[in-house]
Image (spheres, rainbow, N blue to C red):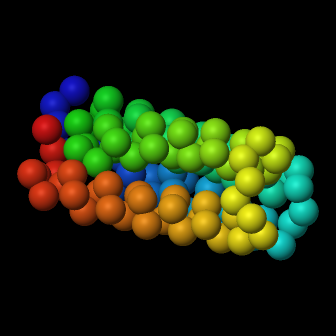
Amino acid sequence: MASGDRSDFLSTLPGGLIGWGLPIAAMLLAIGVPHPVKTWVWVIALIWMGAACLWNAHRCKRRHCFWTGPFFLVMGLAVLAYGYGFVDLGGQGWKWLGAVIGIGAWAIAAITEREGRYR
């Protein structure tokens, strides 16, 4: 499929809400929920966003999607490891994970799209 805005599903309002809005809302709503529910909500949301990014990368060749897709999947593993006690991030671990996810995704998009939005 040709690259460009028409095939960039995540840049549309419905696509953005489905690909990003719902999983981010689920993660935010799960902040006050105890483990294992919070862990699994975050893991599923990150897998959802990672899959949406990879699908969008394949579909429209959006630069940052090639990087944010794998990033979200790796962060899903980090959340799973923290949630089940394999990694100790201290009492503020969820805040650290949330910050790394949010800032990391923003930084990846900002850095990769300096070369242009699409490949």
Q: Position of residue 12 (x, y in %)?
A: 36, 57
In the depicted structure, whether residue 20 falls above or below residue 1? below
* Position of residue 70 measured from the top left corner of the image (x, y, whole percent): 44, 37
Q: On the rendered image, what quadrant is the C terminus found in? A: top left
Q: In which quarter of the image is residue 92?
A: bottom right
Viewer-closest of 79 and 93: 93
Residue farthest along the left direction in this orientation: 115
Disc tally is 0
Q: Where is residue 8 in the image (x, y as percent from the top left)?
A: 29, 46
Residue positioned 54% across, 39% down in the render: 73
Q: Which residue lies furthest to the top in this view?
A: 1
Indicate the quadrant containing the N terminus: top left, top right, bottom left or bottom right: top left
Residue at horizontal 88%, vertical 56%? 35
As drawn, is 75 to the left or to the right of 10?
A: right
Name the residue at 25% across, 37% down. Answer: 60
Is residue 7 toward the left or the right of residue 21 in the image? left
Report the residue at 70% width, 64% height from top: 93
Q: Is residue 18 visible?
A: yes
The reply to whether residue 14 is visible in this rendering is no
Nearer-the-camera pick, 58 or 8: 58
Task: Between residue 73 and residue 53, name the one nearer to us.
Answer: 73
Q: Position of residue 67 (x, y in %)?
A: 34, 42
Q: In which quarter of the image is residue 27?
A: bottom right
